[in-house]
Amino acid sequence: MSRVIIRFWIAVVTLGLLCWEMFPAHAKSEGEIPEQWNLMLVGGSMNTCSSMSLRRCKETDWVDPATMRTEMNVDLSGDRLAGLLASPLWQRDPETEQEIAQTLTRISRHFGEEIVSLSGFRRFFAELYPSLWRALTTEQWQAIRDYLQAAERASVSELSQLELSVERHGAELFHTFAQRATEIAQAEGEAPLVLVVTASGRDSFDAVDFYISSFSQTGVNVEWLPIDAAFAQAVFSSQCENLAGLRAQYQHAYDRERVFPWLAEFQSEFCSQPEKLITLIDRAHGIFINGGDQSLTRQSFILSNGSESAWLKRIRERLQEGKMIVGGTSAGTAVMTEAAMISNGSSRAALKYGAFAIAKPPAADCEELNQCKKAPVADALAYHPEGGIGFYEFGLLDTHFSERGRQARLLQLLVDSKANLAAGIDETTALLVNSRTGDFWVQGANGVYLLAQGERTKGSLTGRFAYLRDGTRGRLSLNGNLVTELHFSEEQKHKTVESELSNFLRDRSITAALQKCSEQILYYDENEDVQVILASDQFTNIAHADSRCEIVWGIIHYQSIGR
């Protein structure tokens, strides 16, 4: 242990010299939300109540399965099985096709005419046919799910009930976004319009009704901007008649035109007349991007030859003119960065292997299939070296941050990509940013990490961090991506949630440790091969130590100790 401590303090001294100019000498406790923010960066999991997320609702007696979507169902009829087996996907694996045909026929006989939920079907499949279930690739399961999904109806949609959400902060974020869009619209003498983008989803049709319903409750007009990876490729290559094939190729989404025919038709109309997208964007005052896969989101805005789409250029123009705001959650936040765009990876793999600059992250089952080509493992830290769509110019972005223990992966990417600053945003929490001035404000249930340029030596990784919570504000500088101001909120609203798992590379344990707000070294073991030290020194500032600890430029240190 003594060797680790010595290495740690050597790194601290070095890091202090590196980071002296990167943050304010002290932090004040005052401030209000910057009125002119134009980016909302949500860390994911807004946890709002809807007819398909009843566990997030205070009450459920309003739910009517006859008039609203409450779950996804499968259709085990002969036509659906035939449609699945006719997919070209199985041509590469005829033996699996035959086994799937026999298995699904048995399952369909078991359920008969009964309506089966997707979750019930999946559970039955996995329990009774475990060998085949384990042998399925991710793409094969996605095809089964999609081809067997029962057709949806435009008149029966997922209904959101923001005011009934058990967790109020996600609902408040919807209202905050809508209020800012309304202010912009009123300045122009127009009715507020928010466009929702669902391109982060493999099935870009599935979440349309949820976002339309959620924003409708805030008092704004809301419409769907029907872009996704397949759409962008179809416009670029003049293949609008082949949207279904492109969905399968680029999104691994199948048979969507049967399940959501009205949305497929709407998207096809815009594909054949892409100028309608620009007209729609010109009418809008806000655009909000859903969560899912940021690599898919990027492909919906940036064409296969690397050039920006016409719709991305127009959104950027309106954002810079102050006529529009842009927001996103999870993948919708990650894609906003102009710097390297993180696309995959765990903290443990990041510490072991470093970061990999690859345009496409490894598949989730690449190890089982022996197909991890450009990265050693499925959870390798991968990033797109050319960045995302470039609305956030102040450094790296990461999401689901405390909840998934992503401090090490973001710090590793900070070092490997030679960036100066990174923001890691917790779930149900937003970083509101004025992209023109750098002013920012934190809103939500949890907090935002800021990581300053760190240092990696053999077996160790060290960096500076700030952890800021609801109401705290500051200013970022484009000149070197620095934090030039920081003001703690005077209110003490929330306590940090303790972690029961104590797994510092995968859960909230690091953030939970901050609740103690200690100025002493906190020393932990992670599965006996990585040790994590949180410490403070003369550069560190602490606020609200008795209830909701916020820290400015504390020290975080990872040390591999072997077995």
Image (cartoon, rainbow, N blue to C red):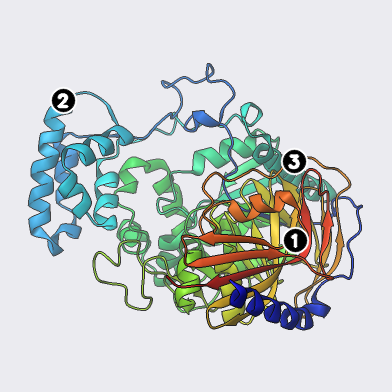
Residue at image point 59% right, 57% down: 399
Q: Is residue 276 visible?
A: no
Q: CA distance from mark 2 to mark 3?
A: 51 Å
Determine which quarter of the picture holds residue 79. Answer: top left
**Residue furthest front as drawn:** 2
* Badge 1 element: loop
Percent x, y of residue 1: 58, 71
Question: Which mark is nearer the camera, 3 or 1?
Answer: 1
Tag 2 residue: 112
Tag 1 residue: 520
- Amino acid carrying label 1: it is Gln
**Residue 134 shown left or right of residue 394 in the figure:** left
Determine which quarter of the picture holds residue 520. Answer: bottom right
For marks 3 and 1, the one nearer the N-term is 3
Q: Is residue 476 visible?
A: yes
Asked whether 161 or 53 is in front, the reply is: 53
Decide: few, some or many residues near mark 3? Use Cα within 10 Å; few <14, some 14-19, many ≥20.
Answer: some
Above/below status of 139 relative to 259: below
Q: CA distance from mark 1 to mark 2?
A: 64 Å
Residue at image point 81% right, 44% down: 546
Percent x, y of residue 331: 54, 58
Decide: few, some or many residues near mark 1? Use Cα within 10 Å; few <14, some 14-19, many ≥20.
Answer: few
Percent x, y of residue 143: 26, 51
* Badge 2 element: loop
- Amino acid carrying label 2: it is Gly
Asked whether 396 or 326 is in front, the reply is: 396
- Amino acid carrying label 3: it is His
Residue at image point 28% right, 45% down: 145
For marks 1 and 2, the one nearer the N-term is 2
Asked whether 33 or 82 is in front, the reply is: 33
Residue at image point 74% right, 41% down: 494
